[in-house]
Amino acid sequence: GPYADGASKSYLRPETAQGIFVNFKQVAYVMRQKIPFGIAQIGKAFRNEITPRQFLFRSREFEQMEIEYFIDPEADFKAIQEDWIMEMWNFLKAVGVNESLLDRQVHEGDKLAHYARACTDIVFRYPFGTQELLGVAARGEYDLQQHAKASGESLEYQVPGQKRKFVPHVIEPSLGIDRLFLALLCSAYDEDEIDGDKRSVLRFHPCVAPITCAIFPLLKNKPPLVNKAKGLASMLRTRGFNVLYDEAGTIGKRYRRMDEVGTPFCCTIDFDTLEDDTVTVRKRDDPMTVERMRRDEIGDFLEKECRLPMSC
């Protein structure tokens, strides 16, 4: 059976970045990349020193995604870092993080990591206080130089068509998925009141909602309605949408259940559907207004609504 001794010692990585640095030269060669270019990775990271607390915010094991963006050492790293800060800020807004709860925090002096030339955090106002959500660091050439020193392998970049070589500098956006998920929950949670009934609602952007669209037959004991509803659900699933079919309870209660879990759209198959193949589309954020739409238009409608509102 398995056993443990000194020879079987292993280490858990504290970040995903170092695997990218080790593979930098190989990626640049195989992918024929010219600087500036970036390598992105998502995976598990581990921090032994952290005391787990504050729900998902602090944990010993978490999911992290990072981009190592390699630049010319003569480039204006401050301008490039600022571009990445704005890119990540816009990304957070696009997926549904409440901008009014975001702020910047610049690391200076003793707060700046030993490897960094500059670092700015995007912080979020959680219920337990304002904390780091995302960081954009200018790491200079520190990591590549350390790997080159330890391995004896040069990690210099050869400029195509020139005799110039250099060790690239790095801009690193780094984001914890668990912290982002918690920020999305905090941003999406809302309460409203309809006809004196106070209710909780999750206002997720359609691109991150666990269920994109719910499909309801008006009556579950009418086979023509049920068949039309199940057909629409099947068609939307083949296009990659997360769809829930529900026939239990009144339409009002079904809408209510979907609001609580953040479903942005609900489609109801009624007797008019059997006549003209249109369905009732109800939007979570405008529950008192419904519209009719052809069944074959629903997929394109959802695709448009799920696009991230970010400029290219």
Image (cartoon, rainbow, N blue to C red):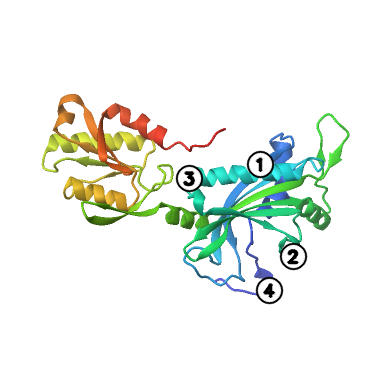
Task: Give the Cα separation between the discs numbered 2 and 3.
Answer: 33 Å
Q: Position of residue 301 (x, y in %)?
A: 36, 31
Q: Which residue is mark 4?
A: 6
Q: Element under label 4?
A: helix
**Identity of the residue drawn at 65% across and 66% down:** 10
Q: Which residue is mark 3?
A: 95
Left or right of residue 244, residue 189 in this image: right
Tell me if I can see residue 39 in this picture: no
Q: Which residue is mark 2?
A: 110
Query: For the residue carrying disc 1, how many other residues have a C-alpha within 10 Å: few (<14), some (14-19), or many (20+)?
Result: few
Q: Earlier in the sequence, mark 1 or mark 3?
A: 1
Q: Which amino acid, mark 3?
A: Val
Left or right of residue 224, residue 19 in this image: right
Task: Give the Cα separation between the discs numbered 4 and 1.
Answer: 46 Å
From this view, report whether residue 100 is shown above or below residue 51: above
From this view, report whether residue 69 is shown above or below residue 104: above
Q: Which amino acid, mark 4?
A: Gly
**Identity of the residue drawn at 51% across and 59% down:** 125
Q: Which amino acid, mark 2?
A: Asp
Q: Element under label 3?
A: helix
**Identity of the residue drawn at 74% across and 45% down:** 78
Q: Position of residue 111 (x, y in %)?
A: 71, 63
Q: Earlier in the sequence, mark 1 or mark 2?
A: 1
Task: Give the Cα separation between the discs numbered 1 and 2.
Answer: 25 Å
